[in-house]
Amino acid sequence: MPSTINEVVFSEPSGRPTSTVQFAAAVIYLGLYAYAWIGGNADSINWLLFMIIGAFLSGIAEALPKNRKFTAGIVRLIAIAVLVCLLAIIFVTPEFITG
């Protein structure tokens, strides 16, 4: 099992197509957050900040050069940690999501 995790997390960055999708997701999440903020409902949609950061970090990890496996793995682990924190917040304080 540890070798499988090592192969997945610390593998070569996927390159431009995958990073483009991740950056596009971050921009879409940012647009949704900006739309809610302009409408005055930013307090009920703060969870999108975690999604923005997670998607942006994933995009960075995939955009790194092929020889930066370890750096990409660290950035992937940070992105996973951000998204796991969101899951923990959902279970501990569900009103963070529901407003």
Image (cartoon, helix red, strand yellow):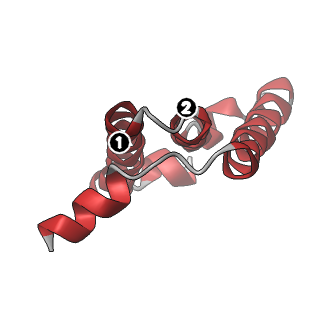
Which of pointers 1 and 2 lies earlier in the amino acid sequence?
Answer: 2
Three-letter residue code for mark 1: Gly
Location of mark 1 (residue) = 73
Q: The residue under label 2 is which amino acid type?
A: Leu
The answer to whether 22 appears left or right of 61 in the picture is right
Occupied quadrant, residue 8: bottom left
Q: Which residue lies under the disc numbered 2?
A: 64
**Is residue 50 something one can see in this rendering?**
no
Q: Position of residue 48 (x, y in %)?
A: 61, 41
Q: Nearer the viewer, residue 98 or 60?
A: 60
In this view, 60 is above or below 2? above
In terms of depth relative to the viewer, which is nearer, 30 or 62? 62
Q: Are marks 1 and 2 in contact (CB under 8 Å)?
A: no
Res 3 quadrant in image: bottom left
**Residue 68 or residue 29, whichever sits in front:** 68
In the rendered image, residue 18, in percent from the top left (x then y), is placed at 68, 52
Instruction: Describe residue 56's horizontal placement relative to residue 79 as left or right.
Output: right
Q: Residue at x 76, y 43 (%)?
A: 20
What secondary structure is marked by label 1?
helix
Distance Cα–Cα, label 1 vs label 2: 10 Å
Farthest front residue?
Answer: 67
x 85%, y 25%: residue? 38
Question: Residue sitting at 59 percent across and 43 percent down?
Answer: 55
Query: Which numbered disc covers residue 96?
Result: none
Residue 94 in view here: yes
Badge 2 local density, few (<14 within 10 Å), some, or many (20+)? some
Q: Please indicate whether residue 46 sits to the left or right of residue 78 in the image.
A: right
**Crowdedness near tag 1: few (<14), some (14–19) or many (≥20) residues, C-alpha within 10 Å:** many
Q: Residue furthest bottom?
A: 1
On the image, the x and y values in percent for residue 51 come to 57, 44
